[in-house]
Image (cartoon, rainbow, N blue to C red):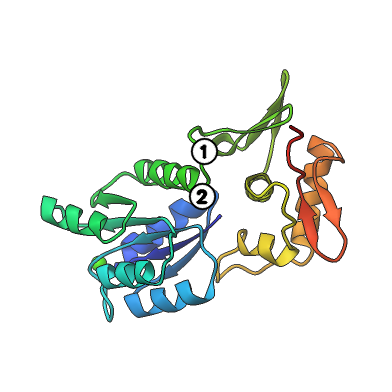
Amino acid sequence: MRLLLVEDDELLGNGLEAGLKQAGFAVDWTRDGRSAQLALATTGYELVVLDLGLPRVGGMEVLKALRARGSDLPVLILTARDTVHDRVAGLDAGADDYLVKPFALAELVARIRALLRRAHGRSSEVIRYRDLVLAPESLTVTRGDDTIVLSGRECAILVDLLEHRGTALSRARLEEGLYGWNEEIESNAVEVHISNLRKKLGADLIKTIRGVGYLVPRDRP
Ligand code: CA
């Protein structure tokens, strides 16, 4: 799950970047609206955390431009502007949620998870597949009485595959959700995570589609 963080305050941006990574997201951090627009045009994100008061191009302009080109990418505005007028303007411009500074990191993470669930048409925190129940928040899969613990990246890959079940996802596509700009991509990382997932959850869960990528089959009706 790769997020774009747009925040010009260094101290807050640093804390947010670290906190969101800790919560299991890959994070790219831009400090002005122009860089945010460039990042949005070139990288696939699951969600944007957007400050409003930004250098070069303001957050509202970034949001309006995104919606004007038909993107339904979830956007959470994070701002010190706390009047009712500001909130209404932000939501009317197409924001999906609005959180006022100062805020608690735990609340921001919970709201991000809620938006991502909604974006994938889920109403609950767990993802069910056959006899498996995946709880991304606790990085666990339960199967009957067994609880299997996943690493953050194993969990991210499994969520991605389960949310696109029936569709093969390429290695590059899966990698994109695992790493931000400043992180070195370990070679074969996706293969290693897939191999670990198969060891933990059974060899038949994730199929390899030669030359294409990986796939979790659709549930049988
Ligand atoms: Ca700002």
Q: Is residue 84 left or right of residue 183?
A: left
What residue sits right under mark 2 in the picture?
22
Name above or below for residue 193 compared with residue 41.
above
Ligand 1 has an atom within 8 Å of the beta carbon of the residue at disc 1? no
Q: How far from the left and from the top, in percent, is residue 152? A: 62, 47
- Secondary structure type for disc 2: helix
Q: How far from the left and from the top, in percent, is residue 52? A: 25, 65
Name above or below for residue 193 compared with residue 130.
below
Residue at 31% in and 56% down: 95
**Viewer-nearest residue: 193 or 111:** 111
Q: In this view, does 170 lie to the left or right of 18?
A: right
Q: Mark 2 against mark 1, which lies toward the viewer?
A: 1
Q: Is residue 66 left or right of residue 161?
A: left
Q: How far from the left and from the top, in percent, is residue 180? A: 56, 65
Quarter holding residue 172: bottom right
Check disc 1 and give the amino acid type: Arg
What is the spatial separation of the Cα atoms under label 2 and label 1, in whole angstroms? 23 Å
Q: Is residue 159 left or right of residue 199?
A: left
Q: Is disc 2 surrounded by few (<14), some (14 to 19) or many (20+) residues within 10 Å?
A: few
Q: Which of marks 2 and 1 is nearer the N terminus?
A: 2
Residue at 85% in and 66% down: 211
Q: Quadrant of the C terminus?
A: top right
Q: How far from the left and from the top, in percent, is residue 218? A: 73, 42
**Viewer-nearest residue: 175 or 210:** 210
Quarter holding residue 65: bottom left
Q: Do the residues labelled 2 and 1 touch (CB within 8 Å)?
A: no
What residue sits right under mark 1 in the picture?
122
